[in-house]
Image (cartoon, rainbow, N blue to C red):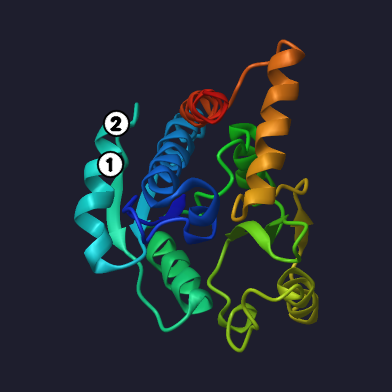
């Protein structure tokens, strides 16, 4: 289980939220995302590896993880020329340590339930590839039982065809593919408003919040905005 992450550094983290929140608040919100994701993984029966985006992110990222309820099994730095190569190398790294499958997620969906990740691990028992679709045409999760370079090379990353092209390539290879329920990352102010609305509905309905730090911080932001 590999979590791709960045250090929560003001001015370099969640930059598309900076116009709405400012650099310090955007970084603090991302820190909440990161800790909520790692905390949620304590319910998942898998080793957890946190992979820093850059070497310079490593020290502040790992320091931020000191607030997590669960220690991670391993800390590493991503490597590769683009996102696809980074994911591929993370999959290879995971499988090289004798694990039967590898799942890679990001830290931009703090309310993603842990049982969705557990379901991905379960599906990898009978499928070669598991994907978690986003509405923007990408995916929030990818799981593989073997490294498949052709799923990543030459991909137009950040386009609305990433998911469909990945499925097309997998089917051409004869791989068994499973899709999880759709979930969306939080990248823009509109995404943040959607997250706040989802969590508010959960609270109103008496449900539990899967990302308590994020929810508490959003409540603090609301109080500041109304002051």
Q: Which residue is mark 1?
A: 64
Please identify the quarter of the rendering in which residue 172 is found. bottom right
**Circle number at residue 89:** none
**x and y percentages locating residue 104 in the rendered image:** 52, 57
The image shows residue 227, relative to residue 135, as above or below, that is: above
Name the residue located 49 percent from the left edge and 27 percent from the top edge.
224
Q: Is residue 85 left or right of residue 135?
A: left
Q: Residues within 10 Å of mark 1 (few under 14, many from 20)?
A: some
Name the residue located 21 percent from the left edge and 43 percent from the top edge.
63
Question: Which one is nearer the viewer's eye here, 194 or 145?
Answer: 194
Q: Residues within 10 Å of mark 2 (few under 14, many from 20)?
A: some
Q: Is residue 166 left or right of residue 218?
A: right
Question: Which one is nearer the viewer's eye here, 210 or 91?
Answer: 210
Q: Can I make out residue 47 in this image?
A: no
The image shows residue 64, relative to residue 189, as above or below, that is: above
Please identify the quarter of the rendering in which residue 11 is found. bottom left
Q: Can I make out residue 55 in this image?
A: yes
The image shows residue 9, relative to residue 213, as above or below, that is: below
Please identify the quarter of the rendering in which residue 166 is found. bottom right
- Which SS class for mark 2? helix
Question: Which one is nearer the viewer's eye here, 175 or 119?
Answer: 119
Do the residues under discs 1 and 2 have CB atoms within 8 angstroms?
yes
- Which SS class for mark 1? helix
**x and y percentages locating residue 221 in the rendered image:** 51, 31
Q: Is residue 43 left or right of residue 139?
A: left
Name the residue located 25 percent from the left edge and 47 percent from the top edge.
62
Q: Which residue is mark 2?
A: 67
**x and y percentages locating residue 15 in the rendered image:** 47, 60
């Amino acid at each position: 289980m590999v979590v791709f992450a960045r250090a929560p550094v003001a001015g370099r983290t969640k930059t598309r939220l900076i116009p709405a929140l400012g650099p310090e608040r955007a970084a603090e919100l991302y820190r909440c995302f990161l800790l909520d994701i790692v905390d949620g993984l304590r319910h998942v029966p898998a080793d957890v590896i946190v992979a820093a985006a850059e070497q310079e992110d490593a020290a502040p990222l790992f320091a931020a993880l000191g607030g997590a309820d669960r220690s991670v099994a391993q800390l590493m730095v991503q490597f590769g020329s683009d996102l696809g190569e980074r994911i591929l190398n993370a999959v290879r790294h995971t499988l090289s340590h004798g694990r039967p499958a590898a799942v890679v997620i990001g830290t931009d969906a703090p309310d993603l339930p842990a049982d969705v990740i557990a379901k991905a691990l379960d599906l990898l028992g009978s499928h070669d590839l598991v994907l978690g679709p986003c509405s923007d045409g990408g995916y929030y999760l990818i799981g593989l039982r073997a490294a498949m370079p052709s799923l990543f090379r030459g991909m137009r990353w950040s386009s609305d065809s990433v998911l469909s092209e990945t499925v097309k390539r997998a089917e051409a290879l004869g791989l068994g593919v499973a899709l999880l329920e759709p979930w969306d990352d939080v990248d823009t102010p509109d995404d943040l408003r959607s997250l706040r609305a989802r969590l508010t509905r959960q609270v109103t309905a008496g449900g539990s919040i899967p990302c308590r730090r994020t929810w508490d911080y959003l409540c603090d932001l609301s109080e500041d905005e109304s002051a």
